[in-house]
Image (tube, rainbow, N blue to C red):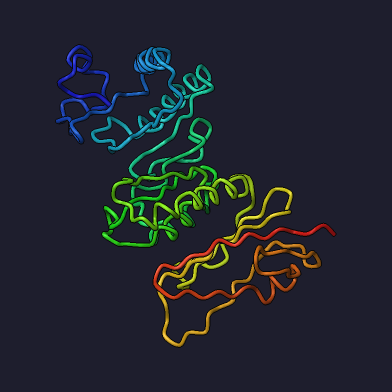
Amino acid sequence: MVNPKSNLYCALPDWVISAGTYPRTELRNQLILNLALVEVQDYIIKCLSNILTSAKISYVKWDHNRSMTEIPSPSIAHAYILGSYQVLYTLTTRFPDVLFEGCASGGGRFEPGILQFFPQIWTSDNTDAVDRISIQLGMSLAYPASSMGAHISSVPNHQTNRTTPLAFRAHVAMMGGSFGLELDPKELLPEEKNALPGLIALAERISPIVINGDMWRLSLPHESSWPAVQFISEDASQVVLFYFQIQPKVNQIMPHVKLQGLVPHATYRIEGEGTYSGMVLMNLGLQYSFEDDYGSKVVILVKEPL
């Protein structure tokens, strides 16, 4: 992007995407540098290389928060993407130890090709935990959980104004590969401060399974008040079940959540609960209850040696 009042734009106004004499639409006080031009690619590579060599920088968030307007031809959009790939290929090759995170309109403009350069992407600016269950499950249809940035944010949520328990927000965020916190310690309740170390420890424990394991969507939030997601580790020795209650029902018999992908005749130990065969877990399932709205539970199962 470039600000129209910048020295760069004043010197090289033809470097932005535009359509001849049509007015150039500013969004966020910006115009878009035309990455289809090799000279623009070289300029950005040089500028960012200078920045990245100027200090011990280990993380870059690469944002793109405005749409293209007044493009001279449809082919420019394709050429622009190819140009951006060239810039990112050069930078990520030149600086292999820098983590680049992609972010575009709350996740709306990333695509599979960009994962070559951005191993993680910001899933959505909507961090409301209830909405995030649907967002993250929908995104998982095309992208691995390991690529999803997911954080515990403060409440009431800045977009939905909804208040959900800290554990619920944490459990939802643990389903992403980049678990983090966006909290003001001064605003936390004493019980929340006491709970955070345990939640962080749980996230660190199950993160390798979420990042490297296989994901199963057991129950979807638009079909049930009890969405459930399961991850199985690469060696199939550990299983993590995320189970949520969005809304309680009066006189509702709590459903059984049936796991998938287990070894039928293997035995699985649930910490603090006992052991079950894979066949029982997949055909009968597990049953849990919650007292309030926005209940959540993370269940860890370990397969015992045959």
The one nearer the camera, 47 or 66, is 47
Residue 276 pos. (x, y %): 73, 70
Residue drawn where x is 64% and y is 52% of the image: 214
Rendered location of residue 27, percent (x, y): 20, 36
Please count the marks in the image: 0
Left or right, 85 with reference to 48: right
Figure check: 48 above or below 105: above
Q: Position of residue 201 (x, y in %)?
A: 54, 48
Q: Position of residue 254 (x, y in %)?
A: 53, 80
Left or right for 299, reference 155: right
Q: From the image, which quarter does the C terminus lie in?
A: bottom right
In this view, 78 is above or below 173: above
- Res 231 quadrant in image: bottom right
In the rendered image of this protein, does residue 63 appear above or below residue 108? above
Tell me the quarter of the picture where residue 265 sits: bottom right
Residue farthest along the right direction in this orientation: 306
Q: Residue visible at 34% across and 17% down? A: 40
At x 44% / y 76%, what residue is drawn?
291
Question: Which residue corresponds to the image point at 41% horizontal and 17% vertical from the top-left?
Answer: 52
Q: Is residue 43 above or below residue 78?
A: above
Report whether 263 appears left or right of 28: right
Horizontal side, residue 220 vs residue 181: left or right: right
In the rendered view of the protein, which quadrant contains the N terminus?
A: top left
